[in-house]
Amino acid sequence: MKIICSKSNLVKGVGIVSKAVPSKTTMPILECILIDATTDVIKLTANDMELGIETTIDGIIDSRGIIALNAKIFSEIVRKLPDNDVTIEVKDESTANITCENAKFNILIKSAEDFSYLPVIEKKDKITISQFSLKEIIRQTSFAINDAEKNKLLTGELFEVNGSKLKVVALDKFRIAIRNIELKENYGNYKVLVPGKSLNEISKILNGGVDDDVNIYFTSNHILFEFDDTIVVSRLIESTNFFDTDKMISNDYKTRITINKKEMADCIDRATLLIKEGDKKPVFLSMKDTEMELTINTFIGSMDESIPITKDGDDLLISFNPKFLIDILKVLDQEEVSMFFTNPKAP
């Protein structure tokens, strides 16, 4: 095998597929990137058995072949090569020669026969949304995923399609994040639970273009994301019944406030200066008439600050973990946000 491609193309391709290389594994072949030049395109693939990524890069195929290289070593070499064309050549079954200008590397290769290829996905049931929308969906919901949770349902996000509507839900034991999207077409009805880890890795490689689409295909066991020159396949989380979030959120509120998002975020940020790392001290919000008073009291000191609000309904005193509020305010884009309360002991 002998291929020639620019360093920039190689760095980009390796960076994309490396998201699917596991940090720890008992199977050395999973630590590899597959370089496939057996057809008319150069394909790079990585697969940790839960998440698989394949992308194509531009280059010249001088002679065809397929090899697997250790991802960590290969990516470090490629990243530090001069900014010029890179040649990867295999003359025997054990070593790959990587050259760029005067730099020459010889690294061991692994048999491509041992590599775990991506599952073949039937491209039948799908939806199409913009890369911008998908990236925003993940950004605005992923904070409510609990990756360390033993309950698998809390480590993923629900993708529910009903005709022309897409609802994405993430929840841990304390928060629910729901994002609704109006789709351009009328699709079927699908409901799948996607691992949060997979979605976060996908978000990192999306270009986020408003005019660039992502095709999302659903099967009973996998979900496939297809965009640009890349495909991402993720195993789904098995779930017969996801939480009924509609029943968890009450519309029967007694207090509603509208507040400037930045003012509230800055105020809470100042309050956290008095919280020692690891402590779980709440902030108290007292809502009366046209202002909300935020107070906190810790062994370090205390703080009191008022913020103007527009209020409908009853006065209220309620407390929250400040981190939960900050996480929410970070992902909201509007200048003003509305908050709805039922009583001091309810969400």
Image (tube, rainbow, N blue to C red):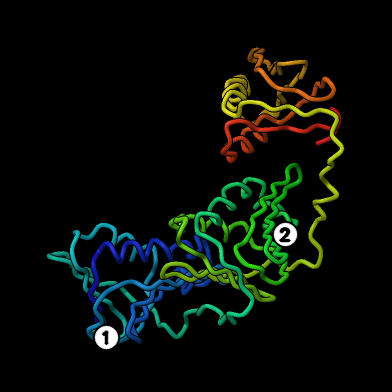
The residue positioned farthest toward the front in the image shown: 185
Q: Which residue is mark 2?
A: 152
Residue located at (18% from left, 63% from top):
84
Question: Position of 346 compared to 28: left or right?
Answer: right
Question: Position of 186 compared to 43: left or right?
Answer: right
Label 1, secondary structure: give it: loop
Q: Which residue is mark 1?
A: 92
Label 2, secondary structure: give it: helix
Residue located at (51% from left, 63% from top):
22
Residue nearer the viewer, 8 or 213: 213
Residue nearer the viewer, 23 or 10: 10
| Relative to 19, residue 329 above or below | above
Where residue 279 sits in the image (x, y, percent)?
A: 67, 28
Residue located at (64% from left, 12% from top):
301
Where residue 109 sits in the image (x, y, percent)?
A: 34, 77
Q: Residues within 10 Å of mark 1 (few under 14, many from 20)?
A: few
| Relative to 159, residue 87 above or below | below
Quadrant hosting residue 143: top right
Label 2 and label 1: CA atoms lie apart by 45 Å
Q: Amino acid at mark 2?
A: Lys
Which of the numbered marks, if any, corresponds to residue 297? none
